[in-house]
Image (cartoon, helix red, strand yellow):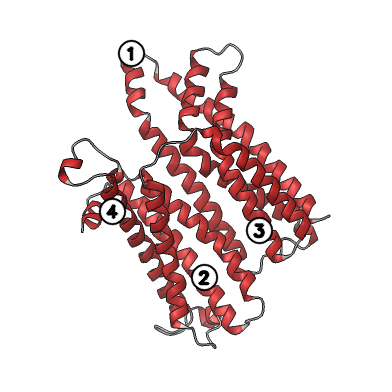
């Protein structure tokens, strides 16, 4: 009940973010149901399709976790412990709210899927959707509900793990591990070639490596901005970027991996493209992954901006011009682009070489 009351009383912008989580969950749930229907119609090769469908599931769960962490209702406040709302209770409330949003998305996915198959109220689009979704084969109800339940369960569990009380780590801690995992992913891609499982494992390792290296890269960008006799503007931009590195780093790394994967697909389009066995829903799945990654980074940036609001007000009270703060923000964005764009391009080039050896 507490989670529902907190969700109902939230601001419209917070509710919009939850609706976006529900929409991402609906898209992922529809993709999982499509893979299930294809497995019933053609059991051969169904396992690689399911493995590839786990990538949208992972980015959806990541997006849900970041939205839950940015929710003002989950932030510890002074005096809430006396009312029985300590960090553990707030963590449970956030996990339940996340599960509810994802469950709504899964229910919407099931309704749309059944409607397109003609099992609710006739056949829309002259039966085109029914042929695509294999309406001539019965849909296993237990398997469909299990796949749809996977989204809210995974999202709520990941939210609870992310919001549990734990000491913060330095941004540079994950940088060596991220570089090592990225190198392992490129090596796995080169070894496996364009096989389904090998390429998926290689890309997954690369994505996880970039996500782990993201905070360290953002911190390094802050150090780069402050290098060589910085003035007040560069010091402000660099120190702020270093402080925000733990928040924006992982989503930034995920977005870099998505950009690298997209560039790899375009680089290989004249050689048959990437062998992703999702059929007509391949590019919608790519769009879902890209939108979730971009929305995750945007949410993290908004959360970081809210965290530095007291410092921003203090600078304005001291007489700092507002255009200085805007210039500092532009300098931070330029530094991140100057590092992330070449990084994504380089990873894409190495991946293309690994897949075409």
Residue 179 in picture, x, y percent from top left: 65, 41
**Disc number placed over residue 318 in the picture, else none:** 1
| Mark 1 or 4, nearer chain start | 4
SS of the residue under disc 1: loop
Please name the residue shown 66% across and 69% down the image: 277
Q: CA distance from mark 1 to mark 4?
A: 39 Å
Residue 258: tell me if it is visible: no
SS of the residue under disc 4: helix
Local packing at callout 4 (Cα closer than 10 Å; few below 14, some 14-19, many 20+) is: many
SS of the residue under disc 2: helix
Which residue is disc 3 drawn over? 201
The vertical placement of 113 against 164, above or below, is: below
Nearer the observer, 48 or 280: 48
Which residue is disc 4 drawn over? 93
| Mark 3 or 1, nearer chain start | 3
Would you identify the image quadrant in which residue 39 lies?
A: bottom right
Residue 256 in picture, x, y percent from top left: 60, 44
């Amino acid at each position: 009940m507490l989670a529902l009351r907190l969700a109902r009383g939230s601001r419209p912008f917070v509710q919009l973010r939850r609706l976006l989580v529900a929409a991402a969950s609906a898209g992922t749930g529809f993709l999982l149901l499509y893979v299930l229907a294809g497995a019933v119609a053609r059991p051969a090769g169904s396992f690689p399709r399911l493995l590839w469908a786990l990538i949208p599931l992972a980015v959806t769960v990541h997006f849900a976790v970041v939205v839950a962490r940015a929710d003002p209702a989950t932030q510890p406040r002074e005096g809430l412990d006396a009312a029985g709302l300590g960090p553990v209770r707030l963590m449970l409330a956030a996990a339940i709210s996340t599960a509810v949003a994802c469950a709504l998305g899964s229910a919407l996915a099931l309704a749309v899927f059944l409607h397109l198959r003609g099992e609710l109220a006739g056949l829309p689009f002259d039966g085109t959707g029914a042929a695509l979704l294999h309406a001539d084969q019965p849909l296993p109800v237990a398997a469909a509900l299990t796949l749809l339940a996977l989204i809210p369960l995974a999202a709520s569990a990941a939210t609870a793990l992310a919001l549990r009380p734990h000491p913060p780590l330095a941004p540079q801690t994950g940088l060596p591990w991220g570089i090592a995992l990225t190198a392992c992913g490129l090596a796995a891609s080169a070894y496996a070639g364009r096989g389904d499982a090998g390429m998926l494992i290689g890309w997954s390792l690369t994505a996880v490596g970039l996500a782990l290296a993201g905070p360290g890269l953002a911190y390094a960008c802050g150090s780069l901005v402050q290098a060589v006799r910085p003035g007040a503007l560069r010091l402000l931009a660099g120190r702020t970027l270093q402080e925000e590195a733990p928040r924006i780093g992982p989503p930034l790394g995920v977005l870099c991996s998505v950009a690298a994967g997209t560039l790899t697909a375009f680089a290989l389009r004249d050689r048959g493209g990437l062998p992703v066995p999702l059929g007509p829903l391949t590019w919608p799945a790519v769009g879902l992954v890209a939108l979730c990654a971009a929305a995750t980074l945007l949410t993290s940036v908004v959360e970081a901006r809210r965290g530095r609001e007291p410092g921003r007000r203090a600078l304005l009270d001291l007489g700092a011009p507002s255009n200085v703060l805007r210039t500092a923000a532009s300098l931070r964005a330029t530094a991140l682009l100057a590092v992330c764009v070449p990084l994504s391009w380089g990873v894409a080039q190495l991946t293309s070489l690994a897949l075409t050896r």
